[in-house]
Amino acid sequence: MNRTEIKLAYILAVLNAVIIGFSFLFAKVTLDYAAPLDTLTYRFAASFIVMSIPVAFGWIKLQYRGKALYKALLLSLMYPLGFFTLQAFGLQYASSAEGGILYACTPVVTLILASIFLKEKTSLLQKLSIFLSVFGVVFIFVMMGSTIDFSNVTGLLLLFMTCVAFAGYSVMARSLSKQFSPAELTYLMLGVGFVTFLVISMIQHIGAGTTDRFLAPITNSTFIVSILFLGIVSSLGTALAANYILSKMEASKMSVFSNLSTIVSMVAGAMFLGEEITVYHLIGSVLIIAGVVGANYLGRKQGVQQQLLSGSSL
């Protein structure tokens, strides 16, 4: 692995955070027209169908034969299935603010799992930087008046499990990157997500006699545009990018970039929804950015040297 590949991984990590930040805006729009499970079905349908085109024409080569396919399926159980399912049910019992606060803890959970299962080593300053980034997100939510209701055990537990699911995905994808290409992991993840969410959604609608509601949103151009962004740009684009990044970068370093999406979502909300940006938003953003830079720059020289030396094994 050369320095160009490492730089590309960092660029994609920032781009990923930008896309995820905007995805919150588009997700809000889709919920005005369809139920959460239906939006997930359409979202993964769009991503899977679009990626199936270059696969069908042979532009993207996939080779699963002789590989530990069950491990890749287990990866899909963590993300997208585990993550989105736990999130959907968790938000039924808890607020979106509580979800945002707990999701900010994902880098910490990833740091712990990566150190246990991948033996990733981080310096004390890098660990402090990761915590600083998490604190920046929590600071913004708290200053907005959001708090965590600890009496709501069910909702908080489910939302915390979304952190574990995404952290588990990051760690396992990092490990599987030695056996599978980013495209192979992404295609399998999207396919499993599409089929699973479609089956569950149709069972619910058929049982309730509301099949017409499932098809109704596709007549709305705003819904279609939002779903295309979520499916193609967000789900497909970020999955490909994330699987590539995890083949070049430690899971603990990549995960901290996710907190940048909080800044992007604030900017998007201000630009398109007229939401206010205050001083505490700016302070929290500075803390987040400082944490991301510190987690990736402090000890970076040593880390890059190790990556270059071990690049052949990746």
Image: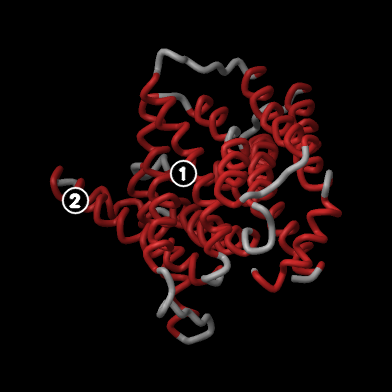
Q: x, y percentage for residue 305? A: 82, 61
Tell me the residue at 43%/50% (across/down).
78
Q: Amino acid under label 2?
A: Ile
- Where is mark 1, residue-wise? 165
Tags 2 and 1 in contact by the CB under 8 Å rule?
no
Q: Is residue 290 left or right of residue 176?
A: right
Tell me the residue at 49%/66% (across/down).
185
Q: In which quarter of the image is residue 7?
A: bottom right
CA distance separating discs 2 and 1: 25 Å
Which mark is first along the chain, 1 or 2? 1
Q: Amino acid under label 1?
A: Ala
Depth check: 276 or 262 in front? 262
Q: x, y percentage for residue 68? A: 42, 69
- Where is mark 2, residue-wise? 203
Depth check: 273 or 9 in front? 9
Q: x, y percentage for residue 162? A: 46, 39
Q: x, y percentage for residue 147? A: 55, 16
Depth check: 281 or 295 in front? 295
Q: Is residue 199 left or right of residue 235?
A: left
Tell me the residue at 51%/55% (across/down).
172
Relative to 128, does residue 69 appear above or below in the rendering?
below
